[in-house]
Image (cartoon, rainbow, N blue to C red):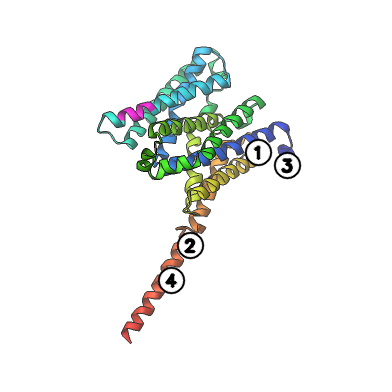
Amino acid sequence: MWSALLTSNTQWVLMSTMVLGIAAGTIGCLAYWKKQSLMSDSLAHASLPGVVIAYLLFARKDLYLLIAGAAVSALLGAVFIQTIRKNSRITEDTAMGMILSVFYGLGIMLLTIVNRSAGGNQAGLDSFIYGQAAAMVRSDVWTMIILACVSIMIVVMMFKEWKIYLFDPDFAKGIGLSLKGMNVLYTLVLVTTIVIGIQAVGVILIAALIIIPPVSARYWTHSFGKMLLLSALFGGLAGAIGTAVSTLGSGWPTGPFIVLFASIQFVFSLVFGIQKGILVNYYQFKKRQKLAQLHAQGVGK
């Protein structure tokens, strides 16, 4: 393991997945409190047809072009979700499910067409479904790190605005904070985090990396600020440890290991978390039960 980690490319990949995990955990907190965790899954799946269409238009696998295609496709999916929700009786979660299915189905159909074309099966676009972090080169890593850091800085520098926007939108409107502008900014940072992560962990697993860390962090604190820090920490650790362990075997997929370690963190938090963890709830239940018994004995006397 250590000999694999000492290689230059592995170190760069590990750094990129760690930064990706931090960004995913940070942005995931916004999605969690906005009650739009499914949005990340929908937009991740909606990005797949954009990747394939970008390849079809330019006939080359250039990361910048594929990321741009994925971003356009994901943003289009977000627009469709909002349009359906505002102009019909369909609920937001139903609209998300519809866009997820339709866009992902379209992406798989286009991907099948590309793979059956001459030289198309050598394009490696299948890696965007499940991720292939080991295939990233240094330029890919730098792109991922820079865009992830930009997303993180937007959340950190606008911490007060995000807090007001998420927890008291009426007050935010009263002080002149544009809810529409914050919605657009939220969608942009979410889409950015998704499209930079699909090469590393894939369109299927990037949603898990956005959803699981904030849920895990919620079991440890009620504070929004502390939850942001813990979620970023959990995401970063999952990215780093998952990548490191995947180097132990030949051809072991990085994305699934990252999500696996994020899931282990969730199970640990679920059991031992000091805020509504299973053990804490059990202890509090037993304490209340004992107090009730003592009270009943006192009344009986």
Which-is-in-front pick, marks 2 and 4? Answer: 4
- Disc 4 residue type? Lys
Q: Nearer the viewer, mark 3 or mark 1?
A: 3
Q: Which residue is mark 2?
A: 279
At horizontal 53% and vertical 41% (from top left) the residue drawn is 259
Nearer the viewer's eye, disc 1 or disc 4?
A: 4
Q: How much space separates mark 2 and mark 4, taking CA atoms?
A: 12 Å
Q: Are marks 1 and 4 in contact (CB under 8 Å)?
A: no
The stretch of residues the image draws in magenta is 79-84
Q: Quadrant of residue 19?
A: top right
Circle nearer the viewer, 1 or 2: 2
Q: Which badge, 2 or 3, is on the more N-terminal residue? A: 3
Instruction: Give the residue number, with chain letter if any, for mark 4.
Output: 287
Q: Quarter of the image for the N terminus: give it.
A: top right
| Residue 58 makes an appearance in the image | yes
Gap in angstroms between the C-alphas marked 1 and 4: 48 Å
